Image: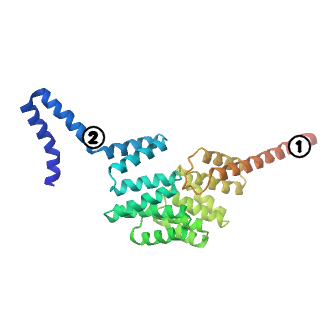
């Protein structure tokens, strides 16, 4: 408490005595040096803030470079290195992400930091083709740390593994834990689709859409439900919206898959429209 107060008061004392004993010009010089010193010692934070700004503007390569610079300045900052690892993974640099997340885990000195880092580690393992190891790690983590992100990640890993009964049981449990998380609900909806339970999937996706998710999988999956119910036009709309969103290395569906599905739906819509036109023409002829 005393140390924190001293850190706040000390700069003001320095500035006070600088202006008092060095005069106006001397005081200004001290202020400039003080600001430069603060910037120098907080370079890592400056780069982090720059990375965040670039990320939100869509400059992902710029954000990545700034995060790398921040880590170079503060190599033992576990959370910072974990952020770098996750961005590397999202951008497709899986091997480099694996290196960074292992370094981050080595640097982490408190359990709360390790919990988040272990989630990223599981994602890296999944992208390395080690899904069983990823699932095992998250199952152990969930015993210690019950959190929405763990439920969301483990839920889709069960789906990726193909154990649909386990996926169903787990994703129902996840929904009980947090029924307002779009990823958790999408996991459950996707599970119902794979089990052929489209009515239940449709009910889930009604709720997913209210949350306005920003990941393409939700709209792609909902399109399959709509196609099954016969609403091809709306299904096509959902697929087109999915294609307007960003696809990452950690997305569970690729842009190519969604584009291929779009072509299938467009062909079906065209066929349906042709049938409708023919039916209308026949009706007119009969009249």
| Image x and y of residue 183, in percent | 52, 58
Residue at mark 1 to residue at mark 2: CA–CA distance: 78 Å
Residue 173 falls left or right of residue 48: right
Local packing at callout 1 (Cα closer than 10 Å; few below 14, some 14-19, many 20+) is: few
| Image x and y of residue 89, in percent | 50, 55
Residue carrying label 2: 39
Local packing at callout 2 (Cα closer than 10 Å; few below 14, some 14-19, many 20+) is: few
Q: In the image, is residue 85 above or below residue 37? A: below
| Quadrant occupied by the N terminus | bottom left
Residue 247 falls left or right of residue 98: right
Number of labels in the image equals 2
Disc 1 or 2, which lies upstream in sequence? 2
Asked which secondary structure carries label 2, the reply is helix
Q: Is residue 116 visible?
A: no
Asked which secondary structure carries label 1, the reply is helix
Image quadrant in which you'd find residue 112 = bottom left
Q: In the image, is residue 43 above or below residue 251? A: above
Label annotation for residue 283: 1
| Quadrant occupied by the C terminus | top right
Residue depicted at 46% across the width and 70% down the height: 137
Residue depicted at 77% across the width and 49% down the height: 268
Question: Is there a contact, CB below 8 Å, between mark 1 and mark 2?
Answer: no
Residue depicted at 70% across the width and 47% down the height: 233
Image quadrant in which you'd find residue 33 = top left
Q: Is residue 2 visible?
A: yes
Image depth: mark 1 or mark 2 in front: 2
| Image x and y of residue 110, in percent | 31, 64
Residue 168 falls left or right of residue 105: right
Image quadrant in which you'd find residue 148 = bottom left
Nearer the observer, 189 or 207: 189
Residue depicted at 47% across the width and 39% down the height: 57
């Amino acid at each position: 408490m005393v140390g924190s107060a001293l850190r706040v008061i000390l700069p003001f004392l320095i500035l006070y005595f600088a202006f008092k004993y060095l005069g106006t010009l001397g005081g200004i010089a001290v202020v400039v040096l003080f600001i430069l010193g603060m910037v120098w010692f907080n370079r890592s934070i400056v780069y982090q803030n720059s990375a965040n700004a670039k990320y939100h503007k869509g400059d992902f390569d710029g954000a990545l470079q700034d995060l790398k610079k921040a880590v170079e300045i503060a190599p033992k900052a576990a959370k910072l290195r974990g952020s770098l690892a996750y961005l590397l993974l999202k951008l497709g640099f899986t091997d480099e992400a694996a290196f960074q997340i292992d370094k981050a885990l080595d640097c982490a000195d408190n359990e709360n930091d390790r919990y988040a880092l272990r989630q990223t580690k599981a994602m890296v393992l999944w992208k390395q083709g080690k899904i069983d190891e990823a699932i095992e790690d998250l199952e152990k983590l969930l015993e210690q740390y019950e959190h929405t992100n763990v439920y969301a990640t483990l839920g889709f890993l069960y789906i990726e593994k193909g154990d649909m009964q386990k996926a169903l049981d787990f994703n129902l449990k996840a929904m009980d834990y947090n029924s307002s998380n779009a990823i958790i609900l999408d996991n459950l909806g996707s599970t119902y689709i794979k089990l052929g339970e489209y009515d239940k999937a449709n009910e889930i996706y009604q709720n997913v859409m209210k949350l306005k998710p920003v990941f393409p999988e939700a709209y792609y999956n909902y399109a399959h439900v709509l196609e099954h119910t016969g609403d091809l036009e709306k299904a096509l709309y959902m697929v087109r919206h999915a294609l307007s969103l960003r696809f990452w290395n950690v997305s569970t569906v690729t842009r190519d898959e969604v584009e291929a599905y779009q072509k299938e739906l467009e062909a079906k819509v065209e066929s349906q429209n042709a049938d409708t036109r023919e039916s209308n023409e026949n009706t007119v002829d009969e009249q």
